[in-house]
Image (cartoon, grey):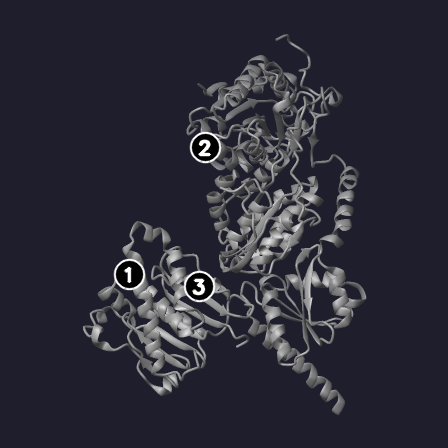
Amino acid sequence: MNNGKPINEERQVFMYGNEVVVWAALAAGAEFLFGYPITPQNEIMHYWSHLAPRYDRGFLQTEDELSAGFATLGGIMAGACCFSATSGPGTVLFQEPLSMAEMMRIPLVLIVQQRGGPSTATVIYSQQEVFLTAFGGNGEGLRIVYSPGSHQEMYDLTIKAFANAWEYRFPALVLGDGYQAQMREPVTLYDPPRRGIILKPPSPLVGLEGVPGKEREPAHWRNAFSVEEELYDALKPIIDDFHWAAPTLTQKEEGFIEDAELIVVAHGIVGRSAEAAVRELRKEGMPVGFFRPITLRPFPDNDIKKVLHACPRLLVAESAQGQLAKLIRIAVGGELEHSIEMYTYFRPGLGITSEEIMREAKSVINRKREESLSAVLL
Amino acid sequence: MSERSMPLSWRKETKPHKFCPGCGHGLVLKALGMAVDSLDIAEKVVFGCDIGCSLLAWDFFDFDTVQTHHGRVVPFIVGAKRVRPNLVGIAYMGDGGAYAIGVQHLVNATMRNDRIMVIIVNNTVYAMTGGQMAPTSLPGQVTETTPKGREPFREGYPLRGPEMIASFAPEGAYIARGTVSRVRPLSHVMERALKNLLDDRGISVVEVLSTCPTNWRTDAEDTWKYLEKEMTDYFPVGELVSS
Amino acid sequence: MTSGNRRIVIGGEGGQGVQAAADILAQAAFEEGKKALYIPNFGIEQRGGTSLAFVQIGTETVGSPKFEHAHLVVALSSRSLERLQGYMNEDSIILFDSSLLEPPQVSDEVVGRQTFNTIAPETFAERRLTGQRQKFPEMLPKVRAVFGLPASEMAQTKLHPRVANIIILGTVAGFTKMVTLESVEAALEKRLAHKIERDPALKDLNLKALEWGWQSAGRMLEGLVPAGEIP
């Protein structure tokens, strides 16, 4: 075998999304996966449980997602880099461990492959877990949420989720979907340090060196407080830290903004359809641009504001009933909120093709042109 | 071992503790402290508490301690133990956490024979939330949610947790029930439970019959009577599974 | 059509090897350095039910994993053909397994500018499978062309029933001409490596099936599509 590293030389492979996640987790140094079966993320557990022994990593299939989440927290606090993966109703149960991670600054990494909702719905695909991942749980949504648009990003952002969870000590989620989980496409695997990506070695919060009470103070961790002021004093610095880190965490991709008369905004796999649609529309001479938030939490507020200052007309396309659209409204806020002109293409639980986005964008642009033409004629 | 008023592993700075007068938690934690002292393993212990009254133990010991959520201390300790097998993981919880909201964790940890210790304080009520019916409330017991007493036809019979898991406990498991009315024997039970872990034999589960005069609305005499008579009659004390 | 990439959808019943065929085709394109994306369509059922596989290959970046219309629609069962109708338009070529499906009735009114070809009948004259054949749906959207290929019958009588999907794979690859036969052979061998190790005869069997499918595509196309205009 090699030097024990899962990846040495860079190599291009043709892979399923769930397999990509596993290689990213291995490359990022994840030591243990606690998981519970739910479609469409099951192959993450399958690939992991096959590959883990080869690289001396651990796996436990738990009794439910609550157990997977709290075992992950226990493993991390004991000093190991642990993670989990889930979907839909599992993401709902994961809110409990996620909220503990927010309060206690535990770098919990969770991969979510979205399925249809509400309820058990479909095992296939959706973008309906945006709010759940960004703001679920009782608390303030102090998480990092990445929305990858390709297998390459699935690999890059999973590694980044580990790096930033441990660097900033907030839970980090990678929000994929059933399509991305189940599709196969090329991806380049690499060893993160060789690309200058720093992954902090994990350190324990309990089970520390030395006899507690004699050689050192015992580590006492809690998340329950007696009075509201006590909670406020504990929580405020965490919120401040999150806001402080936000500008360095946010990430987006945009294109063809300058002379655009319409900006298509979409995230994840739909962002990819949007980009393809915009490229085609540009070939046809249509002045359309695109904006794709890569972090949904923290949201790239300033970036989208800048874009919408240049072109206040946008078309939001998502496989949900306006979850991204609401994030955009929150982000732009204030004055800009009244000047933007938002068109929407919501398909909850349904995939969106480039052709659909092209049609929608064209119809908005043509309608606008007719309107301005009739205004001139009048 | 000489009888101390306070085990060595107790944290002096946080005493007197925060439990109500007459509460049994202090006695359970005393028995545990004595057992840890006698085995001299404080350095290895990771102590996890559930929420409910057990959370008040979050700074009780000179152990590394984490307070978790309702019913979730078992998977938390399972996770810690799985990644650091040399740790002694202790999950401390009440009967509501163990037998209601977190029962799936207790059942599955037992099935897997996870090398952890689970201490379940059975006082027959949800105490911190104000005295509601628990899975362990006795037939006829008046609680805030059974004002006319627990009616088995409607609310079922109390759950004997250790008996339940003993029915399928794998080889190497240690399952026992003790009582705060006999602290020394209880500390011996705790010690055996811990040894079971140190020998890497299997899971150790100790249920402890305890008192809650605050929610029982009993005086000292009736509190003790309830523990010694009604509870002990329904929940027999002793070792259920050992080797 | 938003890109020069070829879009293919293959449908059949669970167990017909639809996904494997699509996956191998995409793998072959990847090995050639082409852009490729394969996605299975799946439901709650673990076994049975219709199974659709979507493949996009070419030189341009692939947009969404699913698409509205396919250049090539392949049907191995009647039920899947019904689901596949949504992916057909006037540019689509339809390929179906004529030993499993009754050939469609030629009717310009119903199916528009349609033809269907089958391979020379000598090897399949017996039509032994006729009794089991499913009905071709009565309505088809207007498509460019329809081809029937008795892949299952060929597999059963000449090779092995299990390689019907490999025949189809060969035909699909031959139709699209986006990958060389050698690349598909290599991808197929890679995929079957473990099985071939246990039973070396499998290699020849599968390669024969593939080649036969590939050649069938050539022969079918000769009769219809002018040179240079590849569907």
Mark 2: amino acid: Met
Q: Name the residue under label 3.
A: C28
Q: Position of residue A322 (x, y in %)?
A: 64, 64
- Percent coordinates x, y for residue B80 in the rendering: 58, 33
* Circles 1 and 2 on the same subunit: no
Type of residue at label 1? Leu
Measure how far apart labels 3 and 1 are at the Cα level: 19 Å
Q: Image quarter for residue A236?
A: top right
Look at the picture and state if A155 lies above or below C61. above
Residue C205: numbered disc: 1
Residue C13 visible (yes or no): yes
Circle 1 residues within 10 Å: few <14, some 14–19, many ≥20: some
The disc at residue A168 is none
Location of residue C12 (image quadrant): bottom left
> In the shown orientation, is residue C84 left or right of residue A32?
left
Q: Distance between the residues labelled 2 and 3?
A: 47 Å
- The residue type indicated by label 3 comes to Ala
Give the SS element for disc 2.
helix
Question: Could you say where residue A46 lies in the image, as x and y percent from the top left?
Answer: 47, 47
Within 10 angstroms of label 3, few (less than 14), some, or many (20 or more) residues? many
Chain-order first, disc 3 or disc 1: 3
Q: Which of A72 and B30 is in front in this view?
A: A72
- Where in the figure is residue A130, as x and y percent of width and height? 62, 57
The residue furthest left is C126
Name the subunit of mark 1. Answer: C
